[in-house]
Each structure stands twice: as C-alpha cells, then as structure tokens.
Image (cartoon, grey):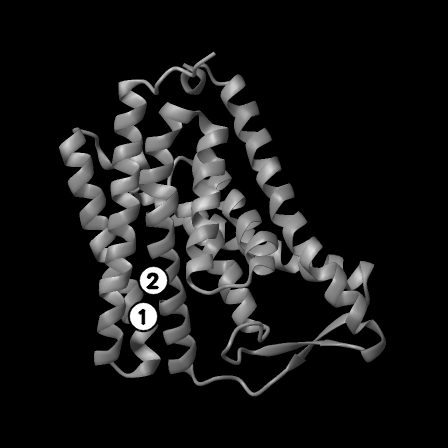
C-alpha cells in the first residue's frame, strides 16, 4: 500500500513554514554580526531588538501576501494585551516559585541567600534584554508558525512540531541535550498552550520573560542576580537529581491545566466552539 501525497494546501503550508524558519535563522545570523559593533554588555539587547523588528516586518509581509490580518497569528497589539502580559508574568513567577518549593520539599531545603544588589542600570539592561530576546523567540515560534500550522495539522500536532523546532534552535545555540529535553521542551509546550488558549503572544511572552528573569534573579544564569540558591552539602546530590525532573513536570502540568481550561471554555461558549 502506498501513502497518498500531501494535499496541495498542506504542501503550501509547509513551504511557507520552511521559508519562515529559514528566514528566521538568517535574521538571527545577520543580526548577530552587529553585536561586534556595540559594547559587549549591549550586544544581546541589540541582537534581540534588531531581530524582533526584522521578524515583525517578515511576519507582516507574509500576512499581507496571504491576505490575513495580524490578529490571525496573535500579534495584534490591543489594550488587553498589557493585562494579558501581566498575567503571563504572574504565571511565570508562580511556575518558578512552585518549582523551587517542590524541590525544596522533595529533595532538601533550598534557601535564598542575598547578595549585593546590582546597580539599577544593570537591572534595567537585564530586563530589557530578556524582554527583547523572549519576544524574538516568541515571534519565531508561537506567532506566524504556530497559527499557520494549526489549520493544516490540528492544534496538538502543530504544538508538537513547534516545540520540537524551538528545542532544535537551542541545540544550535549549543545548549546541552539534557537541558533542552528537560528544560526547553516542557517550557515550549507551556508557551504554546498559553498562546493557543489566550489567542496571542502576550501571555506566553509574559511567562517566558518571568521565567528567565527569575532564573537570573537567583543566580542561575551567567550573570549575578539578587540572590543565590543555597543547599546543604548533604542534600546537593539529591537536589541535583530531582530538580531537572521537577523543572520539567511543573510547566507541563500548567500546560495541561491551560489546555483543559481552554477546552472547557470553548465547550461552554458557542461563539468559540463555532
């Protein structure tokens, strides 16, 4: 038995997606060259801002060609977007707090030790850079591509494809496979669920920014934050073993909760179910 060829509409969808992701990689590569022309501390911010601007132009150009509005891919800015972004920030902070508390209960107490606070300019630069880089990634994966794949593949398969592509992008950045599998993939599923349920990028962007800022605040990134996570010597091995699994489980549980909430809302709202 031979498999039937893909339908023309599905083939066109994949052509557009492959083109968009190829352009996404080219934009990031070209924008990365500009990092050498600014002070190192501002390099990531410049990379994120220039890439985000180029991706917005690319998305709008493709939507105009396809005669689709920006609302079709969730990038239209509306007054409610700011409230949704704030909700995303709260969810992201809650995710990180729940992860730390869960690990502390199951594997050993984790304490926050205060370190000298960074200068206000450093905090501002960190927040701006995190926002720019998160927006860059959300536009690349939870904007045009997710909402273009959904009609052709369905919401679940589209979610899986986008999450795997997001993970692969981090492999290209040089991230370890274990970190990608236990950290990037679960968060990609969460970001996709938040985008699908909310209908736009504001909520997943808020979650993305909050999680990354929380990691910076407790010293989990290359730069010092406000605290450090302290674990007793006797508990370090157990914490190191349990933490990655908890860190993967918490965002997956929230993603499942968002999916169930979205399904329940659609089932009881004829306008959304239509």
Q: Is residue 54 left or right of residue 7?
A: left
**Rendering coords of residue 133 (x, y %):** 37, 62
Residue occupied by mark 2: 132
Circle on res. 45? 1
Q: Relative to residue 247, is residue 167 drawn left or right?
A: left
State left or right for residue 208 relative to residue 229: left
Mark 1 residue crowding within 10 angstroms, few (<14) / some (14–19) / many (20+): many
Extreme front residue here?
1
Q: Position of residue 65 (x, y in %)?
A: 14, 33
Asked whether residue 109 is in view, the answer is: no
Q: On screen, 75 above or below 114? A: above
Write the residue at 30% across / 42% down.
75
Q: Quadrant of residue 244?
A: bottom right
Residue 192 visible in the snapshot: yes
Looking at the image, the residue that sits furthest to the top is: 1
Question: Mark on residue 136?
Answer: none
């Amino acid at each position: 038995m031979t498999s039937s060829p893909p339908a023309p509409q599905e083939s066109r969808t994949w052509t557009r997606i492959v083109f968009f992701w190829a352009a996404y990689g080219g934009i990031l590569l070209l924008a990365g060259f500009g990092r050498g022309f600014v002070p190192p501390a501002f390099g990531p911010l410049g990379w994120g801002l220039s890439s985000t601007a180029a991706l917005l132009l690319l998305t709008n150009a493709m939507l105009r060609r396809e005669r689709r509005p920006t609302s079709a891919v969730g990038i239209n800015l509306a007054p409610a977007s700011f409230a949704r972004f704030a909700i995303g920030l709260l969810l992201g902070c809650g995710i990180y707090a729940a992860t730390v508390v869960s690990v502390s209960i199951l594997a050993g107490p984790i304490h926050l030790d205060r370190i000298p606070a960074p200068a206000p300019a450093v905090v501002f630069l960190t927040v701006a850079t995190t926002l720019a880089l998160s927006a860059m990634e959300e536009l690349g994966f939870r904007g045009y591509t997710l909402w273009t794949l959904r009609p052709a593949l369905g919401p679940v398969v589209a979610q899986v494809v986008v999450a795997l592509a997001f993970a692969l992008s981090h492999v290209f950045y040089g991230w370890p496979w274990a970190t990608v599998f236990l950290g990037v993939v679960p968060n990609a599923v969460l970001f996709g669920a938040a985008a699908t349920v909310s209908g736009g990028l504001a909520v997943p962007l808020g979650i993305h920014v909050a999680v990354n800022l929380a990691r910076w605040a407790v010293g989990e990134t290359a730069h010092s934050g406000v605290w450090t996570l302290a674990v007793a010597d006797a508990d370090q091995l157990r914490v190191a073993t349990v933490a990655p699994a908890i860190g993967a489980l918490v965002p997956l549980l929230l993603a499942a909760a968002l999916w169930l909430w979205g399904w329940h809302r659609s089932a009881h709202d004829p306008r959304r179910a239509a």
